[in-house]
Amino acid sequence: MQIWRKLGLTAWVLAAMGQEAKPELPKVHTSITITAAPVEPGMDHRNNEVFQQTLFSRDDQVFHQLNAGINAGQHEGGGKSIEIRRFGFNLDHGGVNGGMKILVDNVQQNQSTQGHGQGYLGSLKSLTPELVQEATLVNGPFSAEYGDFSGLGVVHIRMRESLPDQFTIRAQGGSFNTQRGFFAFSPDWKNVDSFFAYEGSHTDGPFLKPLGYRRDNLTANITRRFANRRSAGMKFNGGVNRYNSSGQIPLSLVDAGELDRFGFLDSGEGGAIRAVTASAYFRQDLRNGAVWKVDGFLTRSLFDLYSNFTFFLNDPVQGDAIQQHDSRLMQGANTQYLLPHKTGNSYSYLTAGGNFHANQINVGLYPRIGRDPVGVTTAANASVTNGAGYVQENLSFFAGKLLATAGLRFDAFRFDVRDRLAANPSSPQTAGRWQPKLSLAWTPTRRAPVTLHANYGRGISSIDARSILARRDGTKLATTDFYEAGIASNWKRFSLAGDLFWIDRSNEMVYIADDGTLEFQGPSRAWGVEGKASLQVTRSISVSGGLTKVMNAFYRDTSPREYVDRAPHFTANGAITVSALKGWSGSARVRAINGYRLDTADAAIRAAGHTVFDMSLVRRLNRSADFLFSIDNFTNRRYYETQNYIESRPHIGGPAAMGIHGTPGYPITFSAGLTLRFRGK
């Protein structure tokens, strides 16, 4: 069992049962990815079974499995990065308004100063769900381990280091000309955990202009276990994806019958992305029980997105179609030292570490006709460097009744931008922030497994470096102060947790259409409640669910009051899960959001909410074969995944108007597949 479980969920459960939680080190064969978590129940986990039982064709489906109050929707039907909304804030593609940090094996997926959006998560296209070992969700900025983009939470996805069988094959097909294949070879080598895997998929989606979404991913791992409690590993991930898209269309035209819900206005929209990441990991278990870990990675990516948001609003002849380009080289390194120790009668666990992340970026914006650029709007070379150090102490008092975490982190940034269209000299800018962390979990009595918990953390989010070039004296880092207090209980088969949260943001990030940059505006505040519960009905059947209700989210110091927009205030999820019941496994799931405002001042301008039901089934045919079947949106709900209120001119010579633009959600979708396994280890 890994460190984060021993010091997080397991410590909390033991404390709730009145037992003392003694820190234990993970065994040498466990993942060598650096991770450390606070001692509090504001953390959630998803194991690999969640990902094994579902047939995937789009990356937003991965987030549907995570739930945890996260609402994720597509802009482009599957090709472009998802839009994320959480705690009443719209995070765009993951990096604004607090941000949600996504890591895969300690490699940050949020791309700063990206061609399309700050903190862009398009690199998740190369994630293969069958290779996911587990996902850890931190509810807020409560761990000192995580810095930029962590204001509204962290999702750390850890990939497998080997597979249980030497050969694994999955083939699937379904609605909308969808095909997908997965092949993995995991050799049975002595003292080595390894695999080599390929994933290829294609889908046209329900759109009148076929999506043509093609993904090809290669992933590999080799982990070598040495003597003297030492291990080292290398990982590789490369992906290519390309697609056409229908974009976000004016819903007024759909309502008037002038445009099909799955129609389009610009035939050139779509994108092409190529990326490759190589990483290395090292771990040393010391004789005093301490663990030292080091990892590093190198990423090269090329990104081109062809979009049209306003059609003929600004250029009534040529149109407003654009190409957004991003070519980048990223490097990163992490080191961490973990030391279990005893102070008096209290068990403690010290975590100290540092992070380094650097980006060298060629970023540009070009007007286009079709997919051919016809000019240059902006072009810049940007260099963004982030270095950080942190320390965190986990403590256990009164025979495990009181668990406490205190941490402190400092991040330093350097932004350097050279505008290739102007003669302005490069002028590097710097910024830094301290981020304190504190968590408490208290079990008043051993007779009742009830734990009270309280968490506080400060998170940060950085601004796009090109915006600093336009406003050198502007704010460069925004802070998120996140407060959470609640109660949790675990009664054998039934568990329940609820909390109140309060979020103060120093600034919100807004888009400045005149020059295509971002700037901070604010401050803002939000508060609300969360709850989640699970019931193990039988050994094979369980029921679980959760909800997040934001009571209010608004800009402070505004009169009349302006409200934070473009995010739901109610998010809910639920599932009935069957595991190994007479050869059957699977789940029926529901996800729902309420309607939400799309304008800071006018509450009548609202996006429609939705409730969507999905299901999946797995039938074990024999030890070597499984049959899988899934239905997404099995009630065939008509809904829109993302909606925005903007001004546009849909046709040449037509009127310009403000209106809601949206991307339709997929209708009822069927998938079936077969998984074959050979030569079990």
Image (spheres, helix red, strand yellow):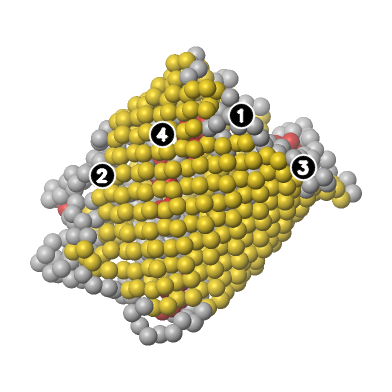
Quarter of the figure with the N terminus: top right
* Residue 466 point in image, percent of width and height: 42, 73
Q: Residue drawn at (48%, 78%), measured in percent from left and top?
A: 474
**CA–CA distance between discs 2 and 3?**
51 Å
**CA–CA distance between discs 2 and 1?**
45 Å
* Residue 295 point in image, percent of width and height: 62, 53
Residue 545 at least partly seen: no
Kindly identify the amino acid type of the residue bearing the numbered disc 1: Phe
Q: Name the N-terminal-most of marks 3 and 4.
A: 4
140 in relation to 220, above or below: below
Kindly identify the amino acid type of the residue bearing the numbered disc 3: Asn
Kindly identify the amino acid type of the residue bearing the numbered disc 2: Gly
**CA–CA distance between discs 4 and 1?**
37 Å
Identify the residue position indicated by label 4 in the image: 182
Front in this rendered view, residue 640 or 293:
293
How many other residues sit within 10 Å of disc 1, few (<14), some (14-19) or many (≥20)?
some
The furthest residue to the left = 653
Identify the residue position indicated by label 2 in the image: 212
Q: Name the N-terminal-most of marks 2 and 4.
A: 4
**CA–CA distance between discs 3 and 1?**
42 Å
**CA–CA distance between discs 2 and 4?**
19 Å
Q: Which mark is residue 494?
A: 1
